[in-house]
Amino acid sequence: MRVLFSRFRSRLLPLTLLGLMLVVSQAMAQAVPQPQTLIPASPQIAAKSWILMDADSGRVLAEHNADERLPPASLTKLMTAYLVERELNRGNVSLDDTVRVSENAWRTGGSKMFIEVNTDVTIRDLLYGIIIQSGNDASVAVAEHLAGGEAPFADMMNQHASRLGLNNTQFVNATGLPHPEHYSTARDLARLSQYIIDDYPEHYAIYAEKYFTYNDIRQPNRNRLLWRDPTVDGLKTGHTDEAGYCLVASAERDGMRLISVVMGTSSEEARAQETQKLLSYGFRYYETLELYEQGAVLNSPRIWGGEKDELRVGVDSDVAMTLPRARNQELSARLDIRPDLTAPISLGDRVGTLEVRLGEEVVGEQPLVALESIEEGGLFKRMFDQVRRFFSNLLSGWF
């Protein structure tokens, strides 16, 4: 199987289904049996809830109580910042736009950016204040600017939580200040972080900034791992008496990015240490393999009634999997292509499924799509193909 997969972001060459089966068979026949690499159990994490996720594929590497609804404290601001970034991306606001600070925003308790009432603050500064300084006042200011108030902004947050599939999350405010109906989960927060990284990478660098100064007040980022581990570049801390100490972190090493979430630890130091345990475990025992490139032709099945007799099919995005280290010899792939493909077919139409297995476990599925458009053939070609398909189906039924 090493002819197919190699360690550290190896590439699988485009193969037809028959070719893939032949190579797999030959490799299995020639391979010398190797002892299976054992993956130890995930470390003991002193937190109410936690999860470790691969950022590329979304595969969960380890978890505990990941769907338990808990108060997220200032991890809430991940969604607040996400909506600001979305509005920037859509052109509805710009970084240089100014926001007039209301008394309501200025009076908001908890952690502060220290904006002053009736002053104008740029969206840029507010975004930095939300992410780095965890400013509750900054969060309320952008909520009022974008939605007219914190309540309608919370409604926007919930709509986007639903759109992103965060099924165990509900927001009541933009800050994370305690409320009995304000909750999220480690799994949902990991997914939200995945969207932040993927959807708006131009703003992601803010999460790695160690300090931000506003109004002559310099405040540090509360994510201690930014000082301890150079591969950590985000995302957000949170703390209230109800939530305990929480941290969502992301790190990238050798082309592999992981996201960890710990909720309900006992101290600032504990959330940093427990997060470091999770990240170290993931990077030590797992690796990311790039299997197929976007647009790679994986097969050319028969298509009936078209201008051409064969249709090139493949994947419409890169396919990468995060797997236990040194087990790539156990990987196999299967193409399940829809039978009796008939023209017309449009570019991007789904025609089947690519299934990747690690031993007997299905570790990933990806749609197979048409890599080209094929129009209907002429009348004679369609009639001729109908006859050929009839006899082809007849003969296949006999054998």
Image (cartoon, rainbow, N blue to C red):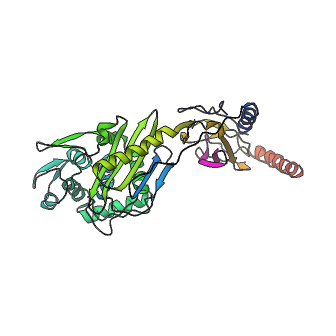
Total numbered circles: 0
Who is closer to the viewer here, 325 or 16?
325
Residue 136 in magenta?
A: no
Residue located 48% across and 43% down the image: 56
Say whether residue 53 is left or right of residue 216: right
Task: State the image coordinates of residue 345 (x, y, percent, origin top left).
Answer: 64, 47
Residue 376 in magenta?
A: yes
Q: Is residue 80 visible?
A: no
Q: Quadrant of the N terminus?
A: top right
- Is most of the magenta stretch helix, strand or loop? strand
Who is closer to the viewer here, 155 or 331?
331
Task: State the image coordinates of residue 52 (x, y, percent, origin top left).
Answer: 45, 48
Task: State the image coordinates of residue 13 (x, y, percent, origin top left).
Answer: 63, 31
The boundaries of the magenta stretch are 351-377
Query: Which residue in the rendered view is the most extreme toward the right?
Result: 398
Say whether residue 373 is left or right of residue 393: left
